Image (cartoon, rainbow, N blue to C red):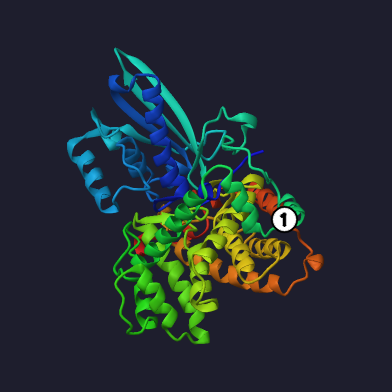
Amino acid sequence: MECISVFDMLKIGVGPSSSHTLGPWRAAELFLKELRDRNIFDQVSSLKIDLFGSLSLTGVGHATDLAVMLGLSGADPEYVPVEDISGIIDHINASQSLLLGGTMPVVFNPKENIVFNRNFLPFHANGMTFTVQYGEHELYESTFYSIGGGFVVKEENPDNQEKEEIKATFPFPIEKATELLAYCKEQNMSISELVYENEKSIRSEEEIHNELLRVWNTMLECMYIGCHTEGILPGGLNVRRRAYDTHSKLKGDLPYNTPQEWLQTIRKTKVYFRQILKWVSCFALAVNEVNASLGRVVTAPTNGSAGVIPAVLMYYLVIENHKAGDKEIKQFLMVAGEIGSIFKKGATISAAMGGCQAEIGVSSAMAAGALCELMGGTPEQVTVAAEIAMEHHLGLTCDPIGGLVQVPCIERNTMGAIKAINAAELALDTDPKNAKVPLDKVVNTMWETAKDMNNKYKETSEGGLAVAVNLSDC
């Protein structure tokens, strides 16, 4: 059984897309490792990257070309200073060379050595092949697939499915929601407590604590940056940042200097009922405006849907429970990660495979379930909340205008966050015995819907708003 950690679902990386940016970036790193393992790294004289399918059709707008260059240059998406990214890319373009692995210069012309192929490889919509020449005239190539959420696989993985290699055997292995609920009942545990036991089987309690808070602090910093940055997003659509204006009207005059002080300041701000939706929307907008400008975000479960979970967690901290702290934050993230893993195992979290229901829909389900537990919901009610959230995202297409993760992607995060809160409230008032649609049924339905969906609506920018809007008018 596939064992997916919370930290697999909530990865720290650079925007704008987990499948089109973070995944290819990680694939480039894996390719470097293959070169070193085969003792040919030092012999490389040239390299080429072929991008296929969705990675080609929306690759420029999603910065896939930049991602593979950064990965091949040895930059780590989790730690590279985002202000250094443009300098690395500018140097490659100006020098027509790439510092492979950060150590060895190789002649490289991005316009010639990165090839955008519109055809799809059979295994997955997001395929890429790296090819190097080494020695006299020897060639080595390797093909990777970015399957959503920053996950990367090779086709030779067992069962020809979207599966990661099993990293560990959890004491409570979970494939479906029914299994999750059975364990919770058997062990008399909440979902977060059960997830914590699984995580303890692969890392120390101190590491779990530190990493969960590092994930949260990255989310908080991302919201802070987005709320304090104004201007136009890059990419050519001339999309104006809106989180700054909304935040300026809401925040009041209390002083602060850090993201942590900012959170405490917002908690002290008197929030009227009609402002709640504005605050939640502001938090979600902030994250995805940072994401759209190649900032650092947390996949939740993807970059394109990265704003939903932080916005809903902030809603709980700012509106619902001013006394909440690290305990509740960790609890929320663990539940969210577990719900997301059930969708990944039973369906997909890749928009190139399932449309936006696989991103915003899953993130809304993750946030709804997590919020429900924090507000006192039983494990059964948590799964009801997740089901309700996804049920009302079924069939949502992915049709980014200009191939950019901006319109309608940014606003969709606000919708997903609001739906998550509503779903949690509905679930808390629901007797699970009366729920008509189990979570596993909606997971299966989402996957069937994904398979039936026309490819035009799966992150190709060949249908929907992507073709209805004239770019020349933007």
Q: Is residue 116 left or right of residue 176?
A: left
Q: Secondary structure at mark 1?
A: helix
- Decide which of 308, 338 is in the foreground and name it: 338
- Is 98 drawn above or below residue 268 in the view shown? above
Which of the 4 quarters of the picture holds residue 387? bottom right
- Is 272 drawn above or below residue 309 in the view shown? below
Residue 241 x/y as whole percent: 35, 69
Which of the 4 quarters of the picture holds residue 261? bottom left
Residue at image coords 45%, 86%: 270
Residue 123 x/y as whole percent: 57, 34
- Decide which of 282, 396 is in the foreground and name it: 282
| Mark 1 Cα shell of 10 Å, populated few (<14), some (14-19), many (≥20) | many
In the rendered image, the residue lying farthest to the top is: 136
Q: Amino acid at mark 1?
A: Cys
Please indicate, yes or no, whether residue 242 appears anywhere in the rendered image: no
What residue would you read off at disc 1? Answer: 184
- Decide which of 472, 24 is in the foreground and name it: 24
Q: How many marks?
A: 1
- Decide which of 229, 468 is in the foreground and name it: 229
Residue at image coords 53%, 40%: 125
Residue 418 x/y as whole percent: 56, 71
Residue 182 x/y as whole percent: 76, 53
Q: Quadrant of the N terminus?
A: top right
Which of the 4 quarters of the picture holds residue 332? bottom right
Residue at image coords 41%, 56%: 297
Q: Quadrant of the C terminus?
A: bottom left
